[in-house]
Structures are given as structure tokens and as C-alpha cells.
Image (spheres, rainbow, N blue to C red):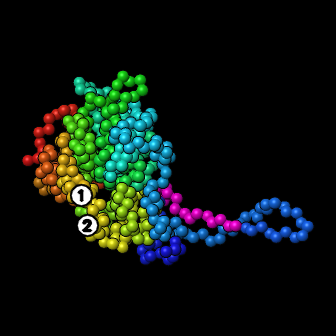
Amino acid sequence: MSSRRPLRPGTVALAAACALACAVAGTPAGAQPRTVDHPPAALSPGSVDPGPVDPGPVDPGPVDPVAAFRPVPPDQRTPERYLPSPSPDPWYSSPPTLDPDTAPGTILATRPVSIPPHNVRNFGRGWQVLVQSSDSHDRPHQIVSTIIEPATPWPGPDPRPLVSFNVTIDSLGLTCMPSHVLPHKFNMELPPFLQILADRGYGLVLTDFQGPKAAYAAGRANGRAVLDGIRAARAFTPAGDPGPLFSGSRVVQVGYSGGGIATGWAAQLQPVYAPELTGVLVGSSVGGVPADYADLFDTMDGTLASGLYRAAVLGLAREYPQLYPLLNDTGDVVAHQLRDACASTNTVGGLAPFPLSALTDVDPRTDPTVIEVMARNRLGRADPAHGADPREVPTGPVQVWHADATVPMGPGPGSSQGPGDTFVPEWTAHRLVDEWCAAGADVEYTPVAGEHVTGAYTAVGPALDWVDARARGVPFTTGCR
């Protein structure tokens, strides 16, 4: 197959959508300039070679306006083609050599960090740590966590609690990670979870849980990274301090949507992957979580949510590269062009609601490779047939909150009811609660008003009040019945 062959039907339209997405993301999408070779002129007898001659301006010829959107031959479709561009952060672009014998959660390097007031207005002290972790297949890799000690004092009497705030990253690029965004950009995590947590005086750890491949939606790797970020934060001692900041702290975690994926998986994996955190991780607040990606074909694929769904599947492929051979020419172009897309770009991508079937020549709903990868990243029932350990059941209390159509939108019995989460239906959250309860976990379901976007705002009060109760040691008295 030649890279100059005509584009498949639909490729130009979808490539144009990618061009818009890349423009939003600031990703260059132009063709590379051609180089022109000029052979030397023949010398006449007796003449002297004048040496190199400047030929002057050279017409490079016509520029192919869609060169960047042409598929490459199959032999060039390696997993590396679809990975994110190198990060300006040396911890990502040139990390220390990995040692497989290093325990997950080990701190490999530290550096101070300052976060501007528009992201954390009462920022006190901050550090970033490079941490050993494990991907979905038990292979070692390195992650980055940001640790914050806010200026707000903790009244005690117990040690300052530590909250793992798992950001809704929902991205495919390394410059979208919290460790880069918090110090350098405006934090697009608009619901004020982070600021309220800092105002209440909690210690905070924010982990780049998508890892060095920015593997969005890869639940097992994301959950392990969160747990290793917590391990590192509890062990970290700032220079000049007498001991670790949070070694004696209660730990609670909270996250929504893509952050809910990481939070839910951290809770589920903890008893097996980080058993020493049993009794330390005293609560997990999981919001708007897509527990089973296969459930979302009807509600996200080919809808206004298709940009995020598309990005999630491309993020999964970074941990499960057996998905890449399923890409057709259109899929090759899209996966390459969106390799650095941040959450805003992926959200805007829903304005071009192409389904996954446009990226492949197989039916993604029935293809065995797709089914197996999605099953391995299904949150809830721990199925040994898909690589799960039956002991993977949350040990600490869990709150599952979700935009639910049964919640009235206003006071009084005659008020209209909210739409519920039209992208991630509330029945999927109910099933997650039922499965965790059946496995022995202690889970509370909290319905909130709105749909998937507004639910992140209406839940701020009940979610953070629940986090506050767990962090302060208030007994958990409700849950599975």
C-alpha cells in the first residue's frame, strides 16, 4: 500500500475533524517541506571549480494540503506511531533507567514545585516525586505525583489527612498531565474539588495516573498508579523536615469520570496490589464512572460523547497494542493525529460524531480482541477468566455517586426530574454497587441531579462532605443492605 494512494471514503471528513481537534490542541498538522537535490554543473576544459554555488530560492513544488492526513503503509503502523509526542519534562523524556527489582511506590527523584493561585489559591508547599509503578501487565514504569501541603492549618488532633485527588485527565498527551498543567497552565478541572480540599486543609496528592504512555481509560494501570502515588506521598519527607508528612495520616481518594476510573480501580486493586494500605485507605468516593466500556456503545459511540469514547479506546490501545492491527486507513490517521489531544480537544471531537466502526473494518461490538480488552478493564465483578483476582474487592468504605434521573431538579413533589447521565447511564452505577456489595465491600450510592457534565457540579457538596467524614474518622454507618 502506498502512502500516496487515494483516501478511503470518509477519511477526508474525519481527517478534517482531526485537523480541527489538532488546532485546538496546538498540535502541528502540516506537511513536511520537500528537499530538492541539485546536481553540480559540468565544468568546461580549463575552468576552475568555483566550489558550492548558492542556487538561490528554490521552488519546493506544490504542497500537498492533506499530506499529514494520509495513512502510512501497514509496516509503518507500529505502536510507537500512536504514542504521545515527547514531553518537555525530562522525567518523561529521559527518565532514570528502570530497575525491575525496585518496589512499586518507591520514590526515585524529587523536586520542589510551586502552583499559582489560579489553580490553588492557598498553596503552601509543594513537591513532585518520580515514582516506580507497574502497568497493566506487571511491567515496571515510572509515574509522576504532585504532593501539596496547603497553607490552611489542620486543627487536629489527628495528623493532617491525605486526599488523593484523581483528576479527570481524559487525555492522550503528556502535556495534559496534572504535573504539567498545575504549575504551568490554567487547571481545566472546573468543578472546585481541588480548591475546596485545599481550603479544608487536607494534604493532597495528584498523580499522573495515565502513566508515561498517557494510557487514558486503562483501568488496571491507572488504579495501580494512584496506589503508588499514595505510597510515595506517605513515605515522602521534605528536605529539612524531621520525618514524612503523611506517614500517620488517614487517606481518602476521590475522582470523577476518567478520574473515577482511576479511583474505582485503585479501590478494587488495593487489597492485592497494596495490602499495606488496608485500614489506611479509609474511603473512596467514585463519581460518574464508566465501569464497563462495552455498555457505552449505544450511549457514547457515534454521539456527542464520541470524542471522549474514541480517545478512551485509543488510550486502551496503548496498554493493549493488539488493538492497533484492527485500524483501517482512517483509524491510522485519527490515532496518529490525536496522539497529543487533551480533554478539551477530545470533548470537542464529539462534534464529529463518527463511531468506532469508522476506524476499523471489524465490528467493534463483536470483535473478540475488542471484547477481551474491554472485559479486562471492566470495573466491578472480579472475573478470573479475564485476568482478575477474586480478592480484588474494596476493603474501605466506598461512595458511588452518579447523575440519576430519579433525583428531582427542584423543591416540591411536582418539580421536573433531571435527565440523568445520558452518556454513562445510572443503571451501570447501580450494577457496580450491587457487584461490589455482593463481593463483600461496603458501598453507599449517592444519586445527584443533572447529567454527566452538570453532575460533576451538583455532587461537589455531598461527595466532599463524605470525603470529609471519612478523613476525620467519622464511622461509616450506611452502605450495602
Residue drawn at 43 percent across, 60 percent down:
79
Q: Is 376 in the magenta? A: no
Residue drawn at the location 41% of the way across and 37% of the way down:
108
Q: In the rendered image, which quarter is residue 428 located in? A: bottom left
Q: Is residue 297 above or below residue 455?
A: below
Left or right of residue 28: residue 141: left
Seen at 37% across and 46% down, the residue is 140
Q: Which residues are magenta?
A: 23-37
Q: Position of residue 28 (x, y in %)?
A: 52, 59
Q: Estimate the x, y position of residue 47 in percent, counting from the top left.
A: 89, 66
Residue linked to disc 2: 298
Residue 96 makes an appearance in the image: yes
Q: Residue 120, percent across and down?
A: 38, 37
In the orientation shown, which residue stands out farthest toward the right? 46
Residue 313: numbered disc: none
Toward the viewer: 205 or 140? Answer: 140
Of residues 159 and 40, the one nearer the viewer is 40
The amino acid type of the residue labelled 2 equals Asp
Secondary structure of the residue carrying tag 2 is loop
| Left or right placement of residue 363 versus residue 5 in this view | left
Which residue is most to the front? 101
Residue 396: give x, y in percent of width and height.
Answer: 19, 41
Q: Residue at x 26, y 49 (%)?
A: 265
| Above or below for 155 versus 386 | above
Question: Three-letter amino acid code at disc 1?
Answer: His
Q: Which residue has dot 1 on it?
A: 386
Is residue 91 shown to the viewer in this render? no
Residue 18, quarter of the rendered image: bottom left
